[in-house]
Image: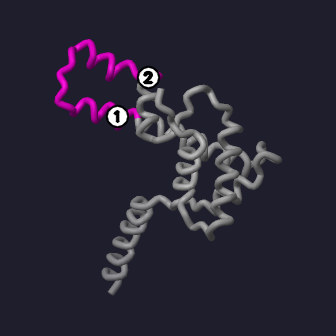
């Protein structure tokens, strides 16, 4: 009987951390809106900073991921490249790569855009989204759509 309890306790203690490692809790648009309510009046507060840093992190992550995905796609293409081209592509990430990758993301923050302006636009769209629906959408979807709407890439 004691062996069975010990075995059950051991198995349970092993499985509990595994369940937590498999999933990341998704931040809802409503939760982000609660944090962003502090922006711009109290942007230095914990909630204001949470809002700003979430949006900034989303942008940074999207750009970094898109550049890497673009480079991986190009590396797998059948196009022959010289050793010099390959080394420049893989070892010298450039602003040009970020600009090209932005087209895949469908938003472009080409000229330096003040972070406060970007956050203000996203917060406005976040509030609008919450008025239209009871928004259980993930925050990332609303932020992404706002960036696409407000900072669409133009053909140049």
Residue 90 found in image quarter: top left
Q: Quadrant of the N terminus?
A: bottom left
Which of these two is toward me, 13 or 127? Answer: 127
- Where does residue 140 sit, x and y in percent of width and height? 53, 53
Which of these two is toward me, 145 or 51? Answer: 145
Residue 20 to residue 100: above or below: below
- Where does residue 80 sit, x and y in percent of width and height? 17, 22
Mark-to-mark CA distance, 2 and 1 = 12 Å
Numbered range of the magenta stretch: 67-96
* x 71%, y 38%: residue: 116
Magenta span main SS: helix
Relative horizontal placement of residue 78, taking residue 115 as reference (left or right): left
Per the image, label 1 sits on a secondary structure element best described as helix
Residue 96 to residue 38: above or below: above
Residue 135 found in image quarter: bottom right
Residue 16 to residue 56: above or below: below
Q: Name the residue under label 1.
A: 70
- Where does residue 113 sit, x and y in percent of width and height? 64, 31
Disc marking residue 96: 2
Residue 97 found in image quarter: top left
- Where does residue 22 sit, x and y in percent of width and height? 39, 61
* x 53%, y 60%: residue: 138
Instruction: Determine whether label 2 and label 1 are within 8 Å by CB.
Output: no
């Amino acid at each position: 009987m004691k062996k069975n309890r010990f075995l059950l306790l051991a198995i349970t203690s092993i499985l509990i951390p595994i369940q937590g490692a498999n999933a990341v809790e998704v931040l809802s648009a409503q939760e982000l809106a609660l944090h962003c309510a502090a922006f711009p009046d109290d942007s230095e507060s914990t909630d204001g900073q949470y809002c700003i840093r979430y949006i900034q992190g989303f942008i940074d992550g999207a750009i970094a991921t898109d550049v890497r995905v673009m480079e991986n796609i190009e590396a797998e293409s059948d196009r022959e490249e010289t050793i010099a081209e390959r080394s420049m592509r893989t070892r010298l990430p450039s602003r040009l790569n970020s600009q090209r990758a932005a087209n895949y993301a469908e938003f472009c923050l080409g000229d330096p855009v003040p972070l406060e302006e970007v956050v203000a636009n996203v917060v406005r769209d976040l509030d609008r989204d919450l008025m239209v629906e009871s928004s259980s959408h993930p925050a990332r979807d609303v932020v992404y759509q706002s960036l696409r709407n407000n900072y669409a890439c133009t053909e140049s």
